[in-house]
Image: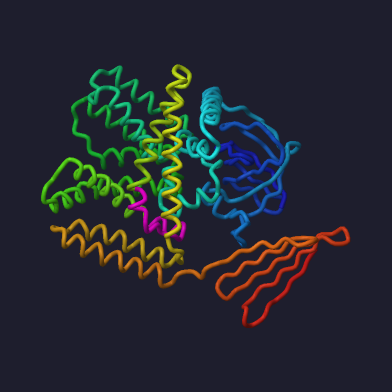
Amino acid sequence: MRARIEGDVIKVMRQSILIEGEVDASIAPAVDTRIILRLRDSVRVQMGERVVAFARVHRPSSQSLPFVFNEAAFCAANHAVFIGETDATRFRIIQRAPLAQQCMATLRGVVAAKIDSLFEQDVASIVQALVLGVDDRIDRSTRSAYASAGTAHALSVSGMHVNIVGAVLFLLCGGKPRRWHTIVLCCMCMTLYVVLTGAEPPAVRAGIMCCAALIGTSRERQVDGLNLLGAAIFIQLLFDPNLMFEVGFILSTCATFSILAFVPMLQSMIRSCMLRPKKWKGALATMLSVNLSASAGTAVPVAIVFGQVAVWSVVANLIVVPILSVALIGSLFVVASDVVLPSLSQPIVWCVSSAIRLSTMLTEFFASITPNTTPAAAVVASVAVLCGTLWFIRSHSWFSLATRSLITATFMWCVLIIPTRPSSEFTILPRTHGIEFLLRSGDELHHVSMYQKYGAVFVRSSHGNTASGFSHSRGD
């Protein structure tokens, strides 16, 4: 259907933009919502600009074949309801972005160009995701591998990235920033980083908490993480109540709450089971507690929304997240020092590239051993993860901890492996006048043939059970 679209640009992607505003269709009443608008021509658009367009609009369709783009999942990730397509002749910018947003867009472009010039293409896409939160350039297979392994949160600027930047600033200030100008400088740097990365809700929440903790520490106040989390959520919902319906905001809040609530208890439990406590054991216990708490807190929401559960997320995050954290720090240092010390940046570029390739290789390995499952089984397994974590906390010995871990893991694997989805095989067969696609899923076989004859393109499809025959359809 045709529609008139008018609204503000809130996200710029490679070949499309995300607009929040009014969609007035010819056969439906006008609604205020989000829409992804594809631009067939090259048009320079910046965030914050107000645009108007006349486009063909449709509801997103789900993935029907492996090579078909999954519009429904893409729209769900961006909280969009419609997808539209137009060209430059039917697209106009009616109001420019504010000066501050124009400056930030220019700075983001400079940083992105610097990253492209320093790193190779396969590494530059992930570096831009780590530093700027721009993840639309990452290969689809790589993004799917990170999602299956449970480490996709590292590719979007969230609380983890802001906390890393805050920790680096805290260490650069000597570990105890007392003077007011030092505190103001640290808060300004964190605010600049959050705004530069697009001011996503998880990053804003983490920035508020870091600034409040920094101010409280300088005033010799006892910092309570749960109080800071509640204050940050209240401030964000005060300015935008619709955040309570956004998946990213909900997952970030659940992960932060579970870390603040479960980590102290898990650390106490693990240390009570240690026969000979040492510093490296304490550090390992902290990392394991954080990963287990975050996985348990987000397992149920992820299973309900996306219909999947990452069974190796605890192990994958324990290995991949520290590697990507080092890569993030190195990338920030390279971007900042390349202008002053270009000779020093080359070794760091090599180290960052090696770390990112290693993390991608490990992520693809964990994704390859993750079983496919049904959404219902994913929900049951995620509840088992949450209950198992609460059960671990009550352990008082290594034997008790190992027994409870074995019982939880056995139950979860039985739930995931028994009702697995049938394996799929996809084949492309080139022909003289066209091409054929074969998709076999269990006993189901789908055959699509496209060929050109007499100046027209014909499409013929057959699908059904291999034992009961096929139903045919034909069109041109």
Horizontal side of 142 relative to 309 (left or right) equals right
Tell whether position 311 is magenta: yes
Residue displayed at 25% across by 49% down: 289
Q: Position of residue 426 (x, y in %)?
A: 61, 64
Q: Main secondary structure of the magenta part?
A: helix
Q: Nearer the viewer, residue 100 or 132?
A: 132
Magenta region = 300-317
Q: Quadrant of residue 399?
A: bottom left
Query: Which residue appears farthest toward the right when viewing the image?
Result: 454
Q: Nearer the viewer, residue 234 or 281?
A: 281
Considering every residue shown, the one lying at the far bottom of the view is 468
Q: Give percent across and percent down for residue 93.
A: 67, 31
Residue 395 position (above or below residue 151): below
Q: Would residue 314 be counted in the magenta stretch?
A: yes
Please name the residue shown 71% across and 53% down the image.
1
**x and y percent of residue 117 in the render?**
55, 28
Quarter of image, res 394: bottom left
Colour scheme shown = rainbow
Q: Where residue 209 sits in the image (x, y, percent)?
A: 32, 35
Q: Image point 69% across, 63% down: which residue?
A: 429
* For residue 251, side relative to residue 433 (left or right): left
Image quarter (top left, top right, bottom left or bottom right) of the C terminus: bottom right
Q: Residue furthest left?
A: 275
Q: Disc count in the image? A: 0
